[in-house]
Image (spheres, rainbow, N blue to C red):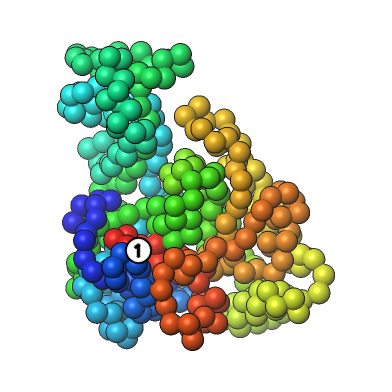
Amino acid sequence: MGLFGGSKNQSLLGVDIGSSGIKIVEISNVKGRAKLMTYGYTEIPSSEGGDVLFENTKQAGSLLADMVKQSGVQTNNAMAALPVSKIFSTIISVPKVTDKKHLKSIIDVEIEKLAPLPLSEMITYTTFLDDKKNNKKDSKNVDHKIKDPKKAVEKVVKGEKKKYIRVLVTGASKTLVQKYIEIFKYAKLELSAIDTEAFALIRSLIGKDKSSIMIIDIGSKKSNIIVVEKGVPFVSRSVNIGGDSITDKLKDQMKLEYSEAERFKRDLGQMAASSDLPGGLPNILEPFMQPLVNEIRYAMKLHSNMELSEQKNVEKIVLTGGSSHLPRIVEYLTEILNMNIYIGDPFARIEYPKDLSGVLDEIGPRLSLSIGLGMRDS
């Protein structure tokens, strides 16, 4: 198993270990087309969510094993995703060099400047964003021998774009990765690779669309805001804004049990989707939405100011996550941001029994991440 690696199995299990529970989706690759085999999810009490699952890897592994058995999963090969909130991700520019060892040294120098942990405590993965063919064409601009990586990095200036390449660097602590390995070991599953949430969501919600798109994944405790350009996450932010805060307010105001308040919140979302709910954004959502709007605008500003980005303006926003069906948020964000906004359909790129359409429409946003993981080889 290699971090961010891949496998070529005919069937793959995408496993989303989130703050509110675990979601699994098995996807098979049938003649290059993704096909839904089975799915399952479990929800845990808010008090047991968050990082609690990772603190007790044996318990999490046992829960995952039970889900796999009950869902009738046929494969033993699985994919997981590292949370946006727990990974290091950045795009850097480095000089073009032909020697791989020199190039790695240069990249490591840049990572050391930015990473929150020493390189010895991290597992990192690099993705080259610029066409390698173009790199060969510009070989006359390449420094073939670089003795000092630090000095080489200093040579990268704005007026010499043909002399450097852009590299996406993603990393995570070895401690975090080890917890994933332990969970899947206890579940008796083969962890083929570990992806990132950003790339899994891009796979299930965006596909081959090369325009500049923002994905907003509204979870129970956190929301991930990802700006994607040509299929690459240029901005990835995790903010402490989630649907649980709405559930807590409903529980307190209406004197409900937590499970009842959660169900009521989802019923409101379904009513809004069917146009049975009158008026605009419910008052109870206003304190939730305003901070989210601020974070959205901040992420857009970060992206537009990035020197290495090419498409400065976000063209549309895709909403997903268990709380994306909150009443009127699509209409509210569309009006406030004056943009094309819609709830993503993670099942749009895979085959599934049509008699499940109604159920999958309801639960789809909650399964976007696990679907994207299951599609890794499709």
The residue at the far right in this view is: 279
Amino acid type, label 1: Met
Q: Residue at x 21, y 73 (%)?
A: 76
Left or right: 335 as drawn, with respect to 323: right
Which residue is disc 1 drawn over?
375
Figure quadrant of residue 223:
bottom right
Left or right: 57 as drawn, with respect to 359: left
* Residue 82 point in image, percent of width and height: 36, 55
* Residue 271 point in image, percent of width and height: 70, 78
- Asked if one can make out residue 66 in the rendered structure from this viewpoint, the answer is no
* Residue 301 point in image, percent of width and height: 61, 36
Figure quadrant of the N terminus: bottom left
Q: Is residue 120 above or below residue 3?
A: above
* Residue 231 point in image, percent of width and height: 44, 47
Left or right: 146 as drawn, with respect to 329: left
Q: Secondary structure at mark 1?
A: loop
Figure quadrant of residue 274:
bottom right
Figure quadrant of the C terminus: bottom left
Q: Nearer the viewer, residue 278 or 219?
A: 278
Q: Is residue 132 above or below residue 68?
A: above
Q: Residue at x 31, y 64 (%)?
A: 32
- Asked if one can make out residue 131 in the rendered structure from this viewpoint, the answer is yes
